[in-house]
Image: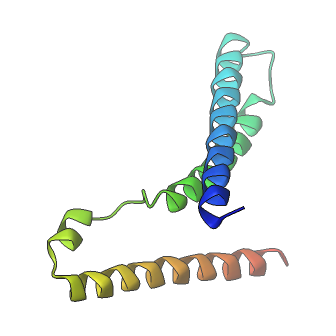
């Protein structure tokens, strides 16, 4: 199994998880609206589903390099500065995720 085929399989897996989670979230919100006063738990479930859609969606966006940015400006740069800009962007992204993991781990004590 090559790295490219693993990446495609992982991307498809994340896409299906996001689709299932979004469909479950939509169905749960509709059920919460229809049964407004009899379902007291729909708000908590919707919050949890939205969090999971956000996590898996961000993982999919990272895999597809689809996060917010200004790729046109980077594409207009000469090849040398373009590589530097791409490396700096990746370092910023990795630093953010390391910081997020560190803060998340420190919150576990609370």
Q: Please identify the residue farthest to the right as the structure is shown.
A: 109
- The way the protein has been coloured in the rendering is rainbow
Residue 62 lies left or right of residue 52; in this view the side is left
Measured as percent of width and height from the top left, residue 95 is found at 53, 84
Measured as percent of width and height from the top left, residue 53 is found at 64, 45
**Of 33 and 55, which appears nearest the observer?**
55
Residue drawn at point x = 23 percent, y = 88 percent? 80
Measured as percent of width and height from the top left, residue 31 is found at 71, 16
**Of 103 and 5, which appears nearest the observer?**
5
Q: Quadrant of the C terminus?
A: bottom right
Image: 90 above or below 45:
below
Residue drawn at point x = 63 percent, y = 44 percent? 12
Q: Quadrant of residue 105?
A: bottom right
Residue 63 lies left or right of residue 47; in this view the side is left
Measured as percent of width and height from the top left, residue 108 is found at 82, 74
Q: Quadrant of the N terminus?
A: bottom right
Q: Quadrant of residue 92?
A: bottom left
Image: 39 above or below 8:
above
């Amino acid at each position: 199994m090559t790295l490219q085929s693993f990446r495609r399989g992982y991307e498809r897996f994340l896409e299906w998880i996001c689709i299932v989670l979004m469909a479950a979230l939509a169905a749960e919100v509709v059920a919460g609206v229809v049964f407004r006063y009899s379902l007291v738990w729909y708000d908590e479930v919707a919050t949890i589903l939205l969090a999971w859609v956000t996590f898996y969606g961000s993982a999919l966006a990272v895999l597809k390099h689809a996060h917010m940015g200004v790729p046109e400006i980077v594409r207009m740069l000469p090849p040398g500065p373009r590589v530097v800009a791409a490396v700096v962007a990746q370092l910023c992204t990795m630093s953010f995720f390391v910081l997020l993991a560190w803060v998340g781990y420190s919150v576990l004590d609370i």
